[in-house]
Image (cartoon, rainbow, N blue to C red):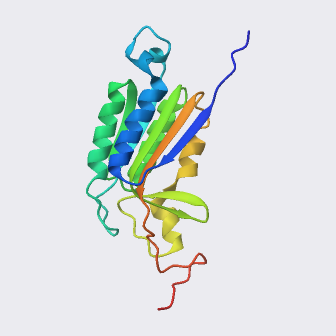
Amino acid sequence: MQRHERRQRLIVFLPDWTAMAVACLLLVGLWLGPAAATPSSDVGREKRVALVIGNGAYKALPELSNPAHDAQDIAAALRDVGFEVVLGTDLDRAGLDAAVDEFAQKASDADTALFYYAGHGFQLESQNHIAAVDAHLSSLDDIERYTVKIDAILARLDRVKGTRIVFLDACRNNPLPKIHARGHRQQR
């Protein structure tokens, strides 16, 4: 008898940290259910890996006070329900890339992979981006240098055999308010 593989993806955009914390804990609790507390259950033996990032100490973008604390709280809650957590706070672009690489490697054979991000994020040309703390976004060229596309992170998780859950608690103010989609500055 062949086992039918189940792959699911859940992406949640959260408007503020309070809603994020409640939603994250409720969804993970509901998803894993009471079996997570029972070591002898199949769910309790599943491999669960999470990448938790909280970026708030930006150099050129407005600083955010909550993301690092929120990330630490979420990481602790996830560890309590059996996740192996890759935690990063106030990561520059190289740190984001390293954390994503570590997560992708650990999650490649996971039953559940969860990605949580708090910090600056934005959408440009139908692509969601998260910003590194060293982001200096004055042109469209800077986006490739200082941000990571959410789709790139999801693509790294294609090998996950089970469920993928993504929580984006991003401050979605436009970091490029004076730049047109073609890369030209707006005239005032």
- Please give left or right for residue 51 compared with residue 1 in the image: left
Please state the horizontal and vertical placement of residue 142, each as a whole percent of the image.
48, 69
Residue 132 spot, x, y in % from top left: 40, 58
Image height of 30 relative to 69, above or below? above
Q: Is residue 62 visible?
A: yes
Horizontally, residue 95 falls left or right of residue 6, namely: left
* Labels in figure, total: 0
In the picture, measured across the screen, residue 34 lies left or right of residue 126, that is: left
Q: Quadrant of the N terminus?
A: top right
Taking 150 as reference, is 31 above or below it? above
- In the figure, residue 126 lies in which quadrant? bottom right
Q: Which residue occupies 54% across, 57% down?
A: 128
Residue 39: x percent and y percent?
Answer: 40, 11
Which residue is the extreme one toward the bottom? 188
Q: Position of residue 79 (x, y in %)?
A: 34, 28
**Which residue is drawn at the image coordinates 38% and 33% (left, top)?**
85
* Residue that lies at the very extreme toward the right in this rendered image: 1
Relative height, residue 39 to residue 149 (above, below) = above
The answer to which image quadrant residue 52 occupies is top left
The residue shown at (50%, 66%) is 143
Whether residue 12 is situated above or below residue 162 in the rendered picture: below
Determine if residue 157 is in view: no
Viewer-nearest residue: 108 or 5:
5
